[in-house]
Amino acid sequence: MRSLFNLCLILVLTLGASSSFAETNEEKGLRLAKEAEARNNGFIGDESDLEMVLIDAYGSKITRKMQGKVLEVKGDGDKTLNIFLNPKDVKGTKMLTWSHKSEDDHQWLYLPSLKRVKKISSRNKSSAFMGSEFSYEDIGSQEVEKYNFKYLKDGKSSTGEDVYFLERIPVAKSGYSKQIVQLSKKHLNALHVDYYDRKSELLKTAEMSGFKKYTVGKKEIWRASVIHMKNVQTKKESIFQWTNRKVGVKLRSSLFTKRSLSR
């Protein structure tokens, strides 16, 4: 029969061991972010038809159609190419993004009216993308290395789905002071993001919906079909909608070069 001293010693050692392995909120936030990244890696390539709807504060709408292609890059951020198909005033415009984990993204915009390629400087990454409520910063991949993470709480999304609430603060200069992400427990994709401006005031919100499952090899990958961005300060909105999406496609890397934009 164990003595009282031995029982107390075991209890102290057990509590000491459990506390030494307890995660901080920062460690848990980073772990969840890395798990989400790993869950969404391995897609190889993604191509789709895209529709972008711009809605002003009075409800008037402008619709633009695009083709979208994304190339997965191992060990770094993805490369994304968007080609505008219509209306006529933007037809032929191309946007190329090279996302990076440890440095600023590289972005170029081809303007057919000028027949030249314009580089988007890091100073302008908080500017609006083609008049939308999405910034150039939003168009780039949201690499884990670009943020400091903190787990806030478990909760429910607006649709009742179980989520983790995470805070992420940009490491480098950004148009945002912080973002609050609602991460789905089911498939580890963001369902909702609150964006706070440099004054720490709520600037805009993004709602992701219409999730679809794609199979690449033996892996299941989930992607949102709709992102609805609302600017709570200007009352303007923008909607991205993906159709005819194919995931796991092999795309030529030569499509994602600055030289290819003007072809």
Image (cartoon, rainbow, N blue to C red):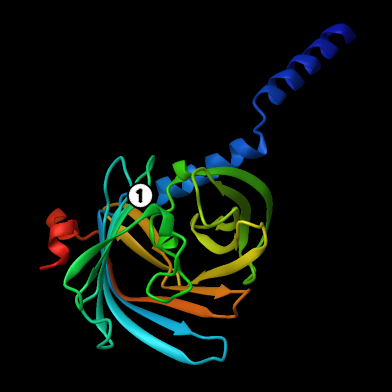
Rendered location of residue 32, percent (x, y)? 54, 45
Rendered location of residue 248, percent (x, y)? 25, 59
Rendered location of residue 219, percent (x, y)? 33, 52
Question: Quick check: 173 above or below 238?
Answer: above
State whether residue 70 appears in this view. yes
Asked which quadrant contains residue 86, the reply is bottom left
* Of 193 and 248, the residue lying toward us: 193
Q: Residue lying furthest right in this view? A: 4
At 49% from the left and 85% from the top, the residue drawn is 55
At 75% from the left and 14% from the top, the residue drawn is 13
Label 1: state its secondary structure. Answer: loop
Q: Judge left or right: residue 199 versus residue 125.
A: right
At 33% from the left and 51% from the top, the residue drawn is 99
Question: Quick check: 170 above or below 201?
Answer: above
Q: Residue lying furthest front in this view? A: 114
Quadrant of the frame with the C terminus: bottom left
Question: Quick check: 201 above or below 235?
Answer: above
Q: Amino acid at mark 1?
A: Asn
Q: Which residue is mark 1?
A: 41
* Of 51 and 120, the residue lying toward us: 120
